[in-house]
Every structure is written in structure tokens, then in C-alpha cells.
């Protein structure tokens, strides 16, 4: 399931849960429970309509500073949202709990469900939100920018051999990502294929699996990427990880890799530049 944003009639748009949404009025009041979607709303020119956000919705900082917080992505203050009287709520299948969305359903007339699983899925996401909130022109500009970044990533894949990487998101227990996550799909766009080669839908597999450093599949590893989120990996962790993996490691900006929405194009270009710089330095 993904946020296709496909327009079903001249007046409705379909979200990732298959729900149809009509055009919102100019006075729409939006609460976002997803950091990357809050950023996207501002970049679509809809910052004035954003009346609530999570404490993790921090970009762009200046535009969001005055927007009231309603808790976290998982722990939401329902009463706070009720008092804000939103007309629309933005949620994500991976980032928000189903029970939270169900509890909010009686309080918010329109809940828009998103689920981009790859960078290209952002094209539909832009058009979904742009269509509902009357920001089609801004959405198309973002789509054009993303198409350009996807093209640059494709050129890189054609010019450089693929590598296998371990993308660390947590320490003790050590955790990584399965290949059916947005993170893995983003890394694959620049020729970095994540290990282990599993998907969360595989029997006995998790989307964010824990592992031990004696796993057999680590023998195929090229390098290790330490994300700055959700665990705050820093330079001081590099020596430890390189000793455990027996491979080179580097810290990468987790927001550039995992945030969808309007950051997707910047993230892809950042990764393209990173791969090129590593090739020059090798």
C-alpha cells in the first residue's frame, strides 16, 4: 500500500488507506503527527493552515516554532488535539499507532493516511496533499525537483558498482532495516543495498531486525552506515563498529536518508554526493 495520491474524480483524492478526500477549504486546520509531513506542508505553502504538530516536527524550525505541540508521534495528547479543532489530521502507517488514529477519528472530520515506501512514492504524496489543499502548483514543482534527483541517482548507479551496506539505527540491541523500508529503498537508489537481504513480510523477519555481530551474512558486507536517528550515533561510535564489523564505517544524517516528503530530493542528492566523495577518497 502506498500514498498514490491518484485523483479518482475531478473533486476527490485517495489516500494510502483507500479513503477519498474532497478539496479542503482555504480555512482548513491541519494537525500533523509526522515530522516530514509537517515540513512538506510548509514547503507546499500551507504553513498557515498547520495548527498542531508533534514535538519531533522541527523543520523548518522558524516556521514551526509557534505551532502548538500535541505530543509525540506515538504518544499523542488527544485532549490537546480536540481543543485545536482540526479539520484534517495527517498520519503515517509506519510512524503512528492505529489505536491513536482510531481514538482521534471521532474528533477530526478528515484523517489523511500516508505510506510512502520509496522515494518515487513521494510524487503521489505531493499530489495527494497538493490536491486536497489546493497547492497543485507547489506540488508539481516538488515533483519536478524529485524527478531530477531520481535521474541523478540513476546516473550514479549506472556509473558505479553497487555495494552492500549495514544501516544501523540502534545500539544494544544492535538493529538495522529490512529491504521493504523507506530507508532501504532510498539507499538502493544510490546503489547501496542493505543487509540482511530480508523483508519485513518474510517469515520470522522484522522490518527493523535486531542482529548479532557473528551473523553469516555480515561476510558480504562492504561498509557500515551509522544513522544519527533514532539512536544518536556519533563519531565516537565508529571505532567500536569498525572493530565489530571488520569493515569501514561512517556516520550519516538520518534525516537525509529516512525523511520523505519535500526532503526526499535533497536527501537523494546528498547521498549521491556522499557516494561520489567516498569513491574519490578510496
Image (cartoon, helix red, strand yellow):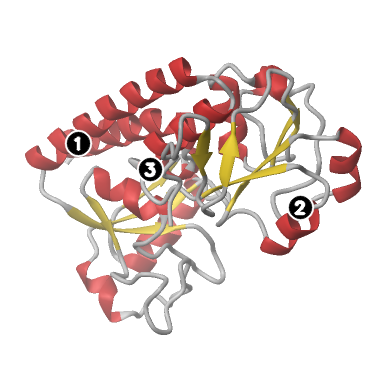
| Residue 121, disc | 3
Q: Residue at x 56, y 30 (%)?
A: 132
Compared to residue 213, the image places residue 95 above or below, namely above
Name the residue beneath numbered marker 2.
105
Work out whether residue 204 can be spotted: yes
Is residue 265 placed above or below 172 in the rendered structure?
above
Q: Label 1, on which residue?
A: 281
Binning the other alpha carbons within 10 Å of mark 3 as few (below 14), some (14 to 19) or many (20 upward) gives some
Specify which label sits upstream in the sequence, 1 or 2: 2
Query: Which mark is in front, 1 or 3?
Result: 3
Q: Earlier in the sequence, mark 1 or mark 3?
A: 3
Residue 127 point in image, percent of width and height:
44, 31
Q: Residues within 10 Å of mark 2 (few under 14, many from 20)?
A: few
Separation (CA) of disc 3 from disc 2: 25 Å
- Per the image, label 1 sits on a secondary structure element best described as helix
Figure quadrant of the C terminus: top left
Using residue 188 as the reference point, say whether residue 169 is left or right of it: right
Q: Secondary structure at mark 2?
A: loop
Camera-side residue of 64 and 110? 110
Residue 257 x %, y %: 42, 43
Amino acid at each position: 500500500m502506498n500514498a498514490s495520491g491518484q485523483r479518482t474524480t475531478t473533486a476527490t483524492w485517495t489516500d494510502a488507506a483507500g479513503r477519498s478526500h474532497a478539496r479542503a477549504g482555504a480555512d482548513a486546520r491541519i494537525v500533523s503527527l509526522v515530522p516530514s509531513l509537517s515540513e512538506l506542508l510548509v514547503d507546499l505553502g500551507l504553513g498557515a493552515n498547520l495548527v498542531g504538530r508533534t514535538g519531533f516536527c522541527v523543520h523548518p524550525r522558524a516556521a514551526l516554532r509557534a505551532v502548538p505541540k500535541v505530543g509525540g508521534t506515538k504518544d499523542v495528547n488527544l485532549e490537546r488535539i480536540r481543543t485545536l479543532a482540526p479539520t484534517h489530521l495527517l498520519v503515517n502507517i509506519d510512524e503512528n499507532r492505529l489505536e491513536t488514529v482510531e481514538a482521534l477519528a471521532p474528533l477530526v472530520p478528515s484523517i489523511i493516511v500516508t505510506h510512502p515506501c520509496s522515494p518515487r512514492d513521494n510524487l503521489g504524496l505531493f499530489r495527494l496533499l497538493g490536491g486536497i489543499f489546493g497547492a497543485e502548483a507547489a506540488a508539481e514543482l516538488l515533483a519536478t525537483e524529485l524527478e531530477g534527483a531520481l535521474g541523478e541517482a540513476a546516473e550514479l548507479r549506472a556509473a558505479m558498482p553497487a555495494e552492500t551496506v549495514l544501516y544501523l539505527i540502534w545500539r544494544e540491541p544492535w538493529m538495522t532495516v529490512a529491504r521493504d523500508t523507506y530507508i532501504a529503498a532510498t539507499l538502493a537508489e544510490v546503489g547501496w543495498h542493505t543487509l540482511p537481504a530480508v523483508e519485513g513480510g518474510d517469515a520470522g523477519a522484522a522490518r527493523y531486525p535486531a542482529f548479532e555481530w557473528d551473523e553469516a551474512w555480515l561476510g558480504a558486507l562492504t561498509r557500515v552506515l551509522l544513522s544519527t536517528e533514532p539512536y544518536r550515533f556519533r563519531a565516537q561510535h565508529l571505532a567500536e563498529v569498525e572493530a565489530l564489523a571488520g569493515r569501514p564505517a561512517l556516520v550519516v544524517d538520518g534525516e537525509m536518508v529516512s525523511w520523505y516528503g519535500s526532503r526526499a530530493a535533497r536527501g537523494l542528492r546528498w547521498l549521491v554526493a556522499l557516494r561520489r566523495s567516498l569513491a574519490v577518497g578510496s
